[in-house]
Amino acid sequence: MTKRGSNADVRMRERLAQEAARVMAEEGVGDFAAAKRKAALRLGAPDTRNLPRNQEVQAALMEYQRLFQAESQPRRLRQLREAALEAMALLAPFRPALVGSVLSGTASEHSDVNLHLFAETPEDVAFFLMDRQIPFETDERKLRYGVDQWRDWPVIRFLAGDVMIDLTIFDPAGGREPPRSRVDGRPMERAGESAVRDLLAEA
């Protein structure tokens, strides 16, 4: 009896991961927790505690893209990486680094290009964009460090064609330690301009 229950739990986790992946790929939900909540609701288990880990959803997302978006997803990913490279060249004074789904390869048509910048103040970046007559909006992002330490960082977003460029701005000292990845909890991977060029060349 216990074994059957355990197998059922595993199957439910797999179904939840697959549905959450579909929600992220097709509906543009970028937050893992929100995608899992939607998946649980659609599978008739809104109160379940048997939710898959973010890594399981990420793996299911990659499989979904391989099976159902084999042509469109790689094409869009390349466009986003090219847009990232152009933005990084523009923002070179702030030592930009690519992070997130465009770096990992799971980006979709709904994804933004996420860059980390390093500046003495966020106003330095704002004035830089204003001087080039680039409209932008500001926001704030809470990022995790260590086990349970959080810090707010300023965010600036602007459109480059049909691609949203999302900039998280770190001060030079505070940005040395990467925040934790929402996928696996490890320090977030960052890629400089040469690494992004390599990714494009490999593709």
Image: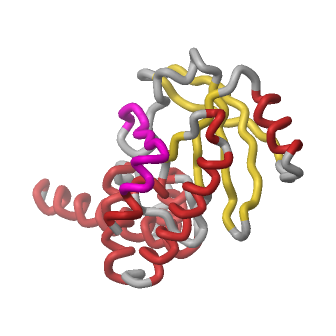
Q: Which image quadrant for residue 161? A: bottom right
Q: Is residue 82 left or right of residue 146?
A: right
Is residue 13 or residue 173 the one in the foreground? 173
Tally of numbered discs: 0
Observer able to see residue 172? yes
Q: Is residue 79 above or below residue 89?
A: below
Q: Is residue 170 above or below residue 76?
A: above
Q: Where does the image place residue 177, in percent across and percent down from the top left?
A: 46, 22
Quarter of the image for the N terminus: give it: bottom left
Q: Residue furthest top?
A: 173
Observer able to see residue 50? no
Is residue 129 or residue 187 the one in the foreground? 129
Residue 60 on the magenta segment: no
Which residue lies at the image location 39% right of the left edge and 50% below the top edge?
54
Which residue lies at the image location 76% right of the left edge and 53% below the top edge?
158
Q: Which residues are magenta?
A: 185-198
Q: How was the colour assigned to the protein in this rendering?
A: secondary structure
Residue 197 on the magenta segment: yes
Q: Is residue 196 above or below residue 95?
A: below
Q: Where does the image place residue 74, in percent across and percent down from the top left?
A: 42, 74
Which residue lies at the image location 48% right of the left edge and 66% below the top edge?
39
Which residue lies at the image location 75% right of the left edge and 42% below the top edge?
156
Q: Where does the image place residue 131, in percent across and percent down from the top left?
A: 88, 42
Quarter of the image for the C terminus: give it: bottom left
Q: Is residue 203 left or right of residue 127?
A: left
